[in-house]
Image (tube, rainbow, N blue to C red):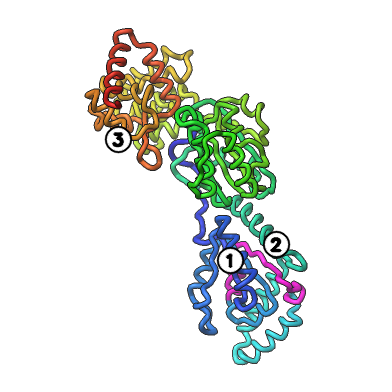
Amino acid sequence: MLPLTSSSSSISRKKYDVFLSFRGEDTRKNFTDYLYEALIRNGIHTFRDDPKLETGEEIAPELFKAIQQSWCSIIIFSETYAFSSWCLEELAEIVKQKNERRQEVFPIFYNVDPSDLRKQKGKVEEAFVEHEERYNEDKNKVQKWRNPLTQVANIKGWHLNNRHEAELIGDIVKKLSVKLCETYPIAATDELIGISSRLKELFSKMEIGEDDVRVIVICEMGGIGKSTLARVMYDQMSSHFEGKSFLANVREVSQKRGLVHLQKQLLTQTLLDEGFNFSDVYEGNAIISHRLSHKKVLVVLDDVNNIQHLKCLAGRHDWFGLGSRIIITTRDEHLQRSYRVDGMYKPAALNENEALRLFNLKAFIRETVPKEDFVELAKHIVGYAGGLPLALEVLGSFLCGRDVTQWKSAFERLKKDSNKKILDRLPISFDGLEEREKNIFLDIACFFNRETKDFIMKILDGCEFFPDIGIDVLIKKSLIKFDRHNQYIQMHDLLKEVGRKIVKDKSVNNLENVVDCERKMTSIMS
């Protein structure tokens, strides 16, 4: 689904997810330190003050700014928290942000009774007696601290009591992870049309924060945007896991390099360790199940078409630690019947408005509203794409910069194929290419998809196809693209199938030309 520009405005993210307020001498070297490390490890960006800041009685301006730039504050009420004027100043600012800007506040009662804080008795009373003596000429200052303390003590929070600290910290991290995922829409990008609602639906199936292991399948026809959907979800959610792995193009990579290569890639990415030396899938299965069974991981297996891929890369749920999530994209719905999955998501094609916006962006160079002469033609042409983003991109790119007469001609050509599937409509972009560019397109579709740019350039130079300009034309027409590291040339599976269909339909003479070029390529490669 999903190329170019989201309609919904995203919520702007704060600089910090969490501001930690605590009494340093009570908890800095124990509970607060453990909590801070757990939050950071789970991708929750947390501000903890540097002890060097605490050099005087007046709170440092950096701390006020950090509170204001945080989505929430966690206040660790320890036995002597109220004795610190520094902590009480922080608390007053936190409550101000809560009341004025609806900042979330989460109290932790670390061996402290919240009723002592509310009623300000016991140690809290002793603390305020000291403050009133120290600031006897500024009674308002002390009162300014009393009210926030009472207000926060009334908020439901976490109690240590007799619990293990590690258990309490686990609960805190889990709740914050879920709250943050609910607060910030996944797809905070303006580069993808129609993705926000689909990500929300997918996210609901993942149930982040639960301790089970869940396998989710994204299943639909090619070109609908399964890989894009999985990639955005992965990018947005991976910080909440202890390890992560995105295995792209599983079907193709397993054919070229084998399943052992993919098993090593999975282990290397999740464990950040390249020291895996095994040569068969059975040994790989054993290592994966042993090394990842106690680790909370996010794994994406993209473009799976064989049950063996699943058996060797995600064999059983107990291969992965509690809280792990495995996302599988596939065109084959039958796979999920042969393998235990916990949920399946079938993304819908773009609706009429989304499709029109995407097409217009490609056809009119980032304009979402077409010129008047093109409005009806654009609607008719979009209708032929059936909500498939790839078709919309290709058709829009093909028509970009052409006049109304050419648009009408293209539309008439489309009407003749009205009963054919979208694959038969995509060659319209191919037809507008020069002969050498057509040959480059077909060669990539048949031989070189997802090979390095340098390798393809060397081969095509040997065929006198002038690939520097030819590849640039294909990229600008959205027929191929570079991978995210700008090293490999990629063609979408739909377009690859179009290219192979074109070759199949060619005359015998033209096929002989392709074979001649292939012989030249073989000679160069050897």
Extreme residue toward the top, this view: 508
Give the residue type that dot 3 points to: Asp
Residue shown at 49% from the left, 36% from the top: 261
Give the residue type that dot 2 points to: Leu
Disc 2 versus disc 3: distance between alpha carbons?
54 Å
Please give the residue where the numbered disc 1 appears in the rendered image.
Answer: 100
Please give the residue where the numbered disc 2 appears in the rendered image.
Answer: 168
Q: In which quadrant of the rendered view does residue 442 lie?
A: top left
Q: Which residues are magenta?
A: 90-117
Disc 1 versus disc 2: distance between alpha carbons?
30 Å
| Magenta-span inclusion, residue 295 | no
Q: Is residue 195 above or below residue 209?
A: above
Give residue 412's position: percent from left, percent from top: 38, 15
Give the residue type that dot 1 points to: Glu
| Element assignment for label 1 | helix
Please give the residue where the numbered disc 3 appears in the rendered image.
Answer: 454
In this rendering, would 456 be left or right of 133?
A: left
